[in-house]
Image: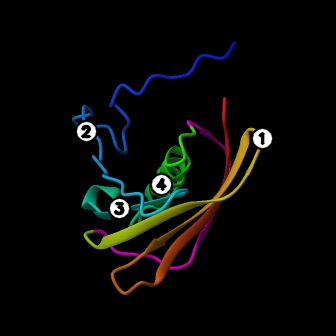
Amino acid sequence: MEKIPEDDQYCYCCGIRNAKGLHLRFAYPEEGKAITTTIIPSYYTGWKNIVHGGYLAMLLDETMAHACASVGKLAFTAEIMIRYKKPIDVGKSIHVEGKIESVRSKIISTSGQIFDADKAVIAEAKAKFMVP
């Protein structure tokens, strides 16, 4: 029997008890969708003043996981594919969306996008999540 993890509120992205975490807050405008907005801290720089792609990948992953949670599914990333469309400077506000595309047995297919303040797509992703 697989152990279901407990949410101890220490998640780096959304945990309120993690002093070094991002403390992201998510909204669920509809079933199967999650959104968040954040300002990118300067310590996530890759090249000079440009946000590191790994930070953007983490935001997409977390937001798609929250889309799964919006329908009561605790799920873990099985695979993720990210396509970066354009760089964004640190210090900018971004909007992240994730949604469920389909559910098959224990696999949830999702998609996600990050938008800048002008609603241009910065990065997009597709991921499969597995339900234990």
Q: Residue at x 56, y 78 (%)?
A: 85
Residue type at mark 2 is Lys
The residue to which callout 2 is attached is: 20
**Lateral position of residue 47 relative to residue 68, left or right:** left
**Lateral position of residue 3 relative to residue 29, left or right:** right
Residue type at mark 4 is Thr
Residue type at mark 1 is Ser
Q: Return the disc, 2 or 3, that comes first in the chain's sequence.
A: 2
Q: Position of residue 11 (x, y in %)?
A: 38, 35
Near-viewer residue (19 or 128)? 128
Q: Residue at x 53, y 47 (%)?
A: 65
Q: Residue at x 54, y 54 (%)?
A: 64
The residue to which callout 3 is attached is: 45
> From which residue to which does the magenta span run?
74-90
The residue to which callout 1 is attached is: 105
Q: Return the disc, 2 or 1, that comes first in the chain's sequence.
A: 2
Of marks 2 and 4, the one in the foreground: 4
Image height of 1 relative to 118, above or below: above
The residue to which callout 4 is attached is: 63
Q: Residue at x 30, y 69 (%)?
A: 90
Residue type at mark 3 is Thr
Q: Position of residue 108 (x, y in %)?
A: 69, 48
| Label 4 to label 3: alpha-carbon separation | 21 Å
Q: Is residue 21 visible?
A: yes
